[in-house]
Image: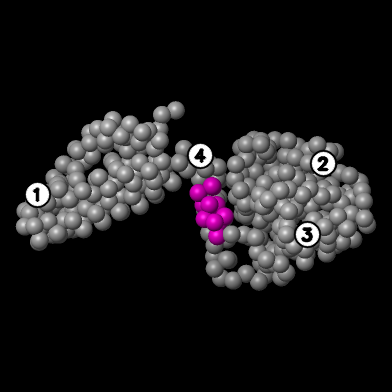
Amino acid sequence: MAASRVLVVIPCYNEAENIVQLIDKLFELYPTIDVLVVDDSSPDGTADLVKKAQEHHPEKLNLIVRQGKGGRGSAVLAGFKWALERDYEIIFEMDSDFSHKPEEITRFLEKIKDNDMVVGSRYLPGSEIHAWGPKRTFFSKWANRYARLVLRIPMSDYTNGFRAYTRKALEMIDIDNIDAKGYVVLSEVAFQLHRKGAKIGEVPTIFVNRRRGISNLSSHEIHEAFFSVLRIRSPQLYLHVKQALKFIVSGGIGAIADLGSLPIMVHLLNVSPYVAPYVSSLFGSITVFFLNKHFTFRNTDRNYGAQILKFALVYGPAIFLNGVISDGLQLLGLHYFLSKVIAIGVMIPVNYFFSHTFVFRNKK
């Protein structure tokens, strides 16, 4: 490895227990590499320890201290920008907690001779995962299968942050337009490179779950990773899936209002079971209108009159069809309550389509 050509980017937050040990190990194994630590103003004094270590490695160890906790993904991207402003030809990213073994860097350097990006995969023959519980193992495997299904990148491990890139690869990435946070940045970078024809290779790796420090992966990041993979693949698909889920929640609350009022009308108010479904549908629809406007679609149109009219044009026929379906199923012998549940399910996709495209479409 020629001097000043290989850079290891290490994003960190509250890694005072680990960072100096990792830096020393890297320079012990690879005296010619450079290291860049990107610290998000860790309150435990991580940056101060790195500054002290710079006294021993004045030309090889570099530090970026960012204001606030921006997350691993954005920290790595900041490191990529820093590297591209200089003469590095191979850029690594790795975690700061010894989950990634510095001894494996040589394996990456050999593989990257024929590739634009090399990923340390935990799911290749010869790979090992140590100290993971069954829940984390299950989630990781299925998250990677899900990412491969959606993104179609020829990789087995989308979520491991032990990677090497050529300068050419990083120059292919539109860094400023990567909107993902946390570990999903890994998938977005890989997706951009794959679409631009970059060659992606993998090497087996031994992943050791952190033995020191505090885990930085939040449940929110895990939750968002599923939606963000869809956004990476197709912003429109992501929007529809997220809105559809909210629509189902809103519709579920509306259905509770609808179904909850139905037996009250039939048994307490003595309304005919053939008439009550129409009235209960109206009650449920009013509930759905306000939930969809302010929760599902976050519509900003203040002209309630026009919007209620649009809603009536859509949900008026929908209420009628809902009642027709319910009545028809009752005539076939189904209980009135079950008939109503089926009718609601049949109308959900129809109502979503017209709500999205007509009733609650925000003006550009």
Q: CA distance from mark 1 to mark 4?
A: 44 Å
Q: Earlier in the sequence, mark 4 or mark 3?
A: 3
**How far apart, in angstroms, are the residues tagged by discs 3 and 2?**
28 Å
Q: Amino acid at mark 1?
A: Val
Among numbered discs 4 and 2, the one appearing first in the sequence: 2
Mark 1–mark 4 CB contact (< 8 Å): no
Task: Give the label on residue 46, or none.
Answer: 3
Range of magenta residues: 219-229
Residue shown at 82% from the left, 41% from the top: 89
Q: CA distance from mark 4 to mark 3?
A: 38 Å
Provide the secondary structure element on which disc 2 rests. Answer: loop
**Which of the two discs, 1 and 4, sits closer to the camera?**
1
| Residue 234: mark | 4
The answer to which of 147 and 161 lies nearer the viewer is 161
Q: Nearer the viewer, mark 2 or mark 1?
A: 1
Residue named by callout 1: 275
Left/right of residue 207 with respect to residue 139 in the rendered view: right
Amino acid type, mark 3:
Thr
Tell me, for residue 2, which label it has, or none.
Answer: none
Q: Are marks 1 and 3 in contact (CB under 8 Å)?
A: no
What residue is rendered at 89% in x and 50% in y? 60
Q: CA distance from mark 2 to mark 1?
A: 74 Å
User: Looking at the image, can residue 184 be seen?
Assistant: yes
Q: Nearer the viewer, residue 123 or 214?
A: 214
- Residue name at image x 23 percent, y 36 percent: 312
Mark pair 4, 2: CA separation: 31 Å
Dot 3: element: helix
Q: How is the image coloured?
A: one colour
Which of the image's four quarters has the C terminus? Answer: top left
Q: Position of residue 280 (x, y in %)?
A: 17, 50
Residue kind at label 2, given as amino acid type: Glu
